[in-house]
Each structure stands twice: as C-alpha cells, then as structure tokens.
Amino acid sequence: MTFSKLITVNKDEDFSIIHFNDATNEIFALTNRNSDKVRVVKFDMDTRQVATVFEHADYDVLGAGFIPQDNELSWVYFAEGKGKLQPLSPTTKKLYQVIESKFSTHFTVNSITQDGKEVILANTDANIPVEYMLFDTETQSFTALGKASPWLKSEHLSDMRPIQFQARDDLTIHGLLTLPRNKEKTNLPIVILPHGGPFGVLDTWGYNPEVQMLAHQGYGVLQINFRGSGGYGKAFFKAGFHQFGSGGMQHDITDGVEWLIEQGIADPKRVMIYGASYGGYATLAGLTFTPDLYACGVDYVGISNLHTFLMNMDESWGMSRESWLENVGNPYTDIKKLKEISPYYHVDKIKAPLFVAQGAQDPRVKQQESDQIVNALRKRGVEVKYMLKQDEGHGFDKEENQQHFYDEMIDFLASCPANNRI
C-alpha cells in the first residue's frame, strides 16, 4: 500500500475527518486551517482542493454528521446558547421539525443506525438529566429507551441558562448561570465555578452534578468560558495565552462576578469560588489577586506555583507540555514572570478562608502544589482546611472519597459568611 500526504496543518490547526464519499472521492472534515473558526469543508482527494460547506461567524462547529438518506452534509452542531443543532439538508430539516415538535426546547443527536433510525439524546429544561429515545425516521415514531439517572427528578433540579457579558476590554464572554429553585433570584450567595484545562475546554449546557448539588444547597452557580476556552474560534483561544493570574483569563472571571452583582443576582458579600485543576489555580488566583471579591474558596487539585508545576511536568503530559511552556511560561527563562502570577508567592494577600483538597498520587498537579500553599499560610498562623487522600490522583475516583469531599465542601461553604475574614 502506498501512502501520500493529503494536507499539512500547523500546531494550532486541526483537520478531523468526519465522512468519506467514495462515489466522488471526497472527504468531509472539521478544520480551522486558514480560518478563525472550525468549519466543515469538503476535500477533493484528486485535485486537493478544499471547499467550505458550512461555517459560523461566531462559533466553532463542534460536530457534524450525515444521515443515510443524504449524500451531502445533514447537520452541524455549535455552542450557541444551549448548543444548537442546525439541520442543513431537506431531509434533515423535515425530520428536525418532527423531532422539535416532540422536544420543544433542546435535543442532540447521539447516534444514527445503518437502517435509517436515529437515537436521540434529549436534554430539555423539563427533563434533566438526559432521556434516550429511538426515533424511527420511516414511521416518525418515538420509543423511550430510558433515562440516564432515573432517580433524579426534574422538579428537584435547577434551570441552567446561557448568559453573556462584556469583559473590561469589550470582548464578549459566554457562560452558564444556574439559580436555585424556589428562591428569590436576587441577592443570592454565589459559587463561581471556573473550568479546568484551561485551553480549549468549554463548559456546555446540560446536567452537571456539581452544579446541581450546589444549587440544591441554595447557591447560584456561574460557569464562565473565559478567554482561552474552546468553541469560539482561534483568536478567542489564543487570547488566553500568557493571561494567567492577574491577566485576562482571571479578569474575565472577575468581570463575571461584577456582572452578577450589577444584575442584582449576587450578594457581593457572599461570592465564593471553587474549581479543580486549572479551576483550582483560578480559585487561588482569585483569593490572592482580588482578595476582597470572595468570601471563601475551595481549591481542588489546583496549581499554586506555576514555576514548580512547570518544572515537574513529566512524560504523562506528552506534547501538551510544549504548549504550556510556550503559552504560559518557561520555568528556566521566565522565573520572574511565573512568580508574579503564582498564588504561592502572594499568600500574604489572602483574606478569605480556604479549603484545599489533593490526591497524593496525582501525576499532573502533584501534591507539592497543595502542600506549599497550605504550609505557607500556616506559617502565617492561618489554619487552612486540607484534605489529602493518599489513594487518589488528579481528582477523587472512589465514591467514599467523593462523598467525603463534597460533604466537607458543603459544610465549609456554609461556614464562611461575609464577615468571616482571616
């Protein structure tokens, strides 16, 4: 068999094949090569010509697919609002109308069978978490297959809605806001929940057990897709480079808090922050670089010292290590800069109570990251709540450890009123 090069992409581009058309010798692919947003293209393997099939001005195409009746692209999916599935072919548009009449708010396609039947993954405001249904495209009938977590009742769960606000530099930032059921929607205690990653990760609408747990305890929850997140194009992604700590990524989180306060949703004296991995770093950065903003924080397997973190990166990081060194900092040549944006070197600024949780076997964010921030605070005479699990890694996998962590976190959040300052 002889192989030949079809196309070349650089390190910040992608070209993911989604479909072959043997009749025309064409490939359909998702790519952001020569464009800001990920789009669907048709690649002619004979002529090597690339033609755009679908692109969105504001969002990356996150998914695209074909149904058996179509020779051309059937549908695309992108992160607008709750996530938008857009039908493209005449056949898919007709099917979409039937499905939409059944699911009035939101649904996503999970898989398509060879005989023309679809399995629908339905996420609706009244039906969280998901219910799986089989839709027969010939008879246009629906058969319930079951719910992902039938013990969870929609009447006990809180609505999540997409939001957006303008950052201080006028960049549009998207996010998700969940407000507790049966409570006033103003002057609420709020938990800010920054995602991990951080680069290329995207918080999406749908059932989230942590969010629902916090909402059930009476907290509003704000998730922010700060610059550097995925789904909004190459420029938005790159806007997060070298923006850790007191830079644009953290400013987006801060601006989200200020937006909530301006909307009258958040009680400015009862804003808390909790995150894991990079979200843990964002928690520590929030407590150090904006010490008057938060009533308390929970750092779960988070980075406290970017210099030691980058020095300790091992082979498990693979090619992403190079990306971190290039887009965050080099531990050999950027020591001063890394110290400036590392919470460990600014513990004297922390005013709010802190809870730290760590796995001793964590291969990515090593125990040293939690030990050093805890020890630095304790040297100041500050008692930090520290949960160290010897049998866990980067996040707790064992059910008993998860239960312990969440029980302790709920108690901790409840114990940090506005005037409980270090």
Image: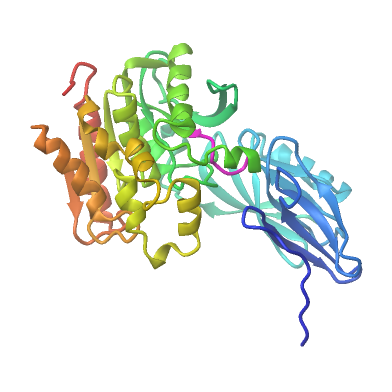
Q: Is residue 147 magenta?
A: no
Q: Which of the pair 258/398 is nearer the observer?
A: 258
Q: Which of the pair 351/180 is nearer the observer?
A: 351
Residue occupying the point 20% across, 40% down: 408
Q: As displayed, is residue 276 above or below residue 268? A: below
x and y percentages locating residue 201 in the rendered image: 52, 46
Which stretch is magenta?
224-232
Q: Is residue 213 visible?
A: no
Q: Quadrant of residue 80?
A: top right
x and y percentages locating residue 136 in the rendered image: 74, 56
Q: Is residue 368 visible?
A: yes
x and y percentages locating residue 175 in the rendered image: 53, 31
Residue occupying the point 78% across, 55% down: 137
Q: Quadrant of the C terminus?
A: top left
Task: Say how many tags the image has.
Answer: 0
In the image, taking residue 235 as reference, residue 265 lies left or right, namely: left
